Image (cartoon, rainbow, N blue to C red):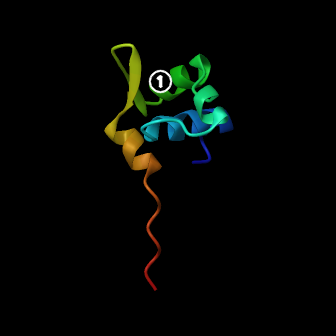
Amino acid sequence: MPDLSPFERAALFALCRRAPLFKWEREAPSEPALASLERKGLIARDGEGWRLTESGRRRTRPARAPHR
């Protein structure tokens, strides 16, 4: 994901998990990073929180190994 900043990547992966495990994961989703991810269509507002969009889910899946 070279087009995402480190703060955006941290926020996106923190949202993928059900509960943040580490301190940096709890602090990662800053408002500017979340707003940027929303503009890129990777997350959407869900009431008072956020949820991943289908595009966001695809971006966070592990890459497939190339065929040999």
- Residue placed most toward the observer, 68 or 30: 30
Mark 1 neighbour density, 10 Å: few (under 14) some (14–19) many (20 or more): few
Q: Amino acid at mark 1?
A: Arg
Depicted 40 relative to depicted 56: above or below: above
Q: Is residue 54 left or right of residue 27?
A: left
Q: State the residue in front, 57 or 48.
A: 48
x and y, in percent, of residue 28 in the image: 62, 30
Q: Is residue 12 left or right of residue 53?
A: right
Residue occupying image coordinates x 47% and y 24%: 39
Across and down, in percent, residue 11 comes to 56, 33
Instruction: Give the farthest residue toward the top.
Output: 48
Q: Which of these two is toward me, 31 or 2?
A: 31
Looking at the picture, does residue 46 appear above or below residue 41? above
Q: Identify the residue at horizontal 60%, vertical 38% (top origin).
A: 10
Query: To which quarter of the image does residue 6 belong?
Result: top right
Find disc 1 in the rendering and name its residue: 39
Give the residue drawn at x 33%, y 14%: 47
Q: How many marks?
A: 1
Disc 1 secondary structure class: helix
Q: Is residue 47 above or below residue 26?
A: above
Residue 65 located left or right of residue 2 = left
Q: Quadrant of residue 67?
A: bottom left
* 23 sits to left or right of 36: right
Residue at screen point 57% across, 26% down: 29
Q: Position of residue 2 (x, y in %)?
A: 62, 47
